[in-house]
Structure formats: C-alpha cells, structure tokens
Image (spheres, helix red, strand yellow):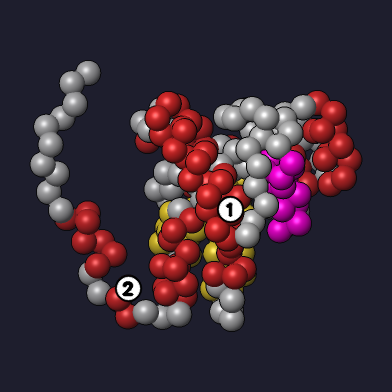
Amino acid sequence: MKQITFYLDFISPYAYLAFEELPKALLGLSYSVQYKPVGLGFLLRHHGSLGPAEIPAKRDWTYRHVMWLAHSKGIALEMPAVHPFNPMALLRLAVAAGADGLPNRYVCETLFRHVWVGGADATDAARLQAVTQALAPARDAGDDAVKAALKAHTDTAIAQDVFGVPAFEVDGRVFWGLDALPMLRSYLEGDTWFDGGHWDASKNLPYGLPPRKA
C-alpha cells in the first residue's frame, strides 16, 4: 500500500477541490494519506513566485475558474468574504488538532469547508472560536511547539521541491495540482511510463532565456 503525503493550505481553492476529489480520483486503489498543512506564502517566497491572487488579471481568472470547476464537479464552493487572507490561524489549528501535528481527514474537511462553504469571512474571530471549539484540539494553536511543527512541515515540503499546493508526494515523486490527480492514479496503478526516463527528462533540457536583470 502506497502512502501519499498531501501538502495543503486552506487558503487555496484548488487544494480544497483536490481534497474533495481525491477519494473519487483514487477509487479502488490501495493507499493511505498523510495530510500536511504548509504555509503556501512561504513556499512561494522560497521559489520567488507570486500567488495567483497577487496578479490582478490572474486573480479574476482563478476565482472564475475554481467556481466553474466546483460547479462542474458538483462540489459546494462559495468564495469567502475576503480572499486572499492570512491562513496561519487555520494552519496552526490543523496542526494543533492532529496527532503528532498531522491532522486527519475530518479536521482538514472541517477547515476547508469553514473557508469554502457559505461565503463567510474565514478569519472572523467568532467563527474561528467556533471552529476551534468544534475541533477541540489537544494543544493550543498558539503554542510554540505547534508553530514549530507547521514550520517543519513547510521546510520538508521545500526540501522535496514542493512549490505550491495542492501537492501529493509518493515515493519521492511530487504531483502538483488538481489536474495531476489522473497522473497520480496512473503512477499508483503501475503505469510503466514512470519506469523510463520521462520523469527526469526535463532536468536535462537546456534553458534558453537570458538571466533576468536585477
């Protein structure tokens, strides 16, 4: 049985859609999932990237696209009252509510739906208090140990070349994005394509653009 590490941040609508689609996408296969909350903002900064919401035209398209995807897949999704927002309280709550800092599917589902179902403000203090009470974490989300565990998850993701969410790691291979779920399934099914040199071929492809000026 393969173990999949699912790197996620509740701020990402694509991570939410992938979370909802994963059981269907991998139906019939033998696998286990370890959910690891990470700070998407830290991943982006490490790799020198901007988030979709930081580029106005891309922001508009992203929101339009995820709402259509949810509609097409029959998944409930309403944009939260404010987006983007600071997701650290939710990420730390997920870590605090999980054994050894690893939340189970119920915890992740609760927090994803806190953000993406109902159209409310994900960072509203009263709502945060209510979802914290509902999850009843064993540790305080503000504890230094919780913060350190979240940083460790993010550092692990960076070490594995994770550059965004959702990302799925299995056997040292990282599959990125909602649209990578069919590829992930193919790998788990033993597709021989992965036995050749296709996976690493891009690393040997010459880069043809001049360096960017500072």
Is residue 151 visible in the rendered structure shown here?
Answer: yes
Q: Quadrant of the image for the N terminus?
A: bottom right
Rendered residue at 87%/37% (across/down): 130
Q: What element carries label 1?
A: helix
Q: With respect to residue 48, does 28 lie above or below? A: below
Q: Give the amino acid type for the residue marked by disc 1 in the picture.
A: Ala
Quarter of the figure with residue 58? top left
Q: With respect to residue 161, does 190 lie above or below? A: below
Relative horizontal placement of residue 206, taking residue 125 as reference (left or right): left
- Residue 103: assigned label: none
- Spatial CA span between label 1 and label 2: 30 Å
Q: What element carries label 2?
A: helix
For the stretch drawn in magenta, what is the main secondary structure? Answer: helix
Is residue 154 visible in the rendered structure shown here?
Answer: no
The tally of labels here is 2
Q: Residue 22: percent from the left, percent from the top?
A: 58, 64
Count residues near mark 1 (Cα–Cα under 10 Å), then give few for <14, some for 14-19, many for 20+. Answer: some
Q: Give the amino acid type for the residue marked by disc 2 in the picture.
A: Phe
The part of the chain drawn in magenta is: 105-118
Q: Residue 197: percent from the left, percent from the top?
A: 23, 69
Q: Residue 125: percent from the left, percent from the top?
A: 80, 26
Rendered residue at 44%/58% (across/down): 179
**113 in magenta:** yes
Relative horizontal placement of residue 48, taking residue 107 as reference (left or right): left
Q: Quadrant of the image for the C terminus?
A: top left
Residue on which the image places disc 1:
70
Q: Nearer the viewer, residue 61 or 195?
A: 61
- Residue 194: assigned label: 2
Rendered residue at 37%/79% (across/down): 191
Quarter of the figure with residue 78? top right
Decide which of tag 1 and tag 2 comes sooner along the chain: 1
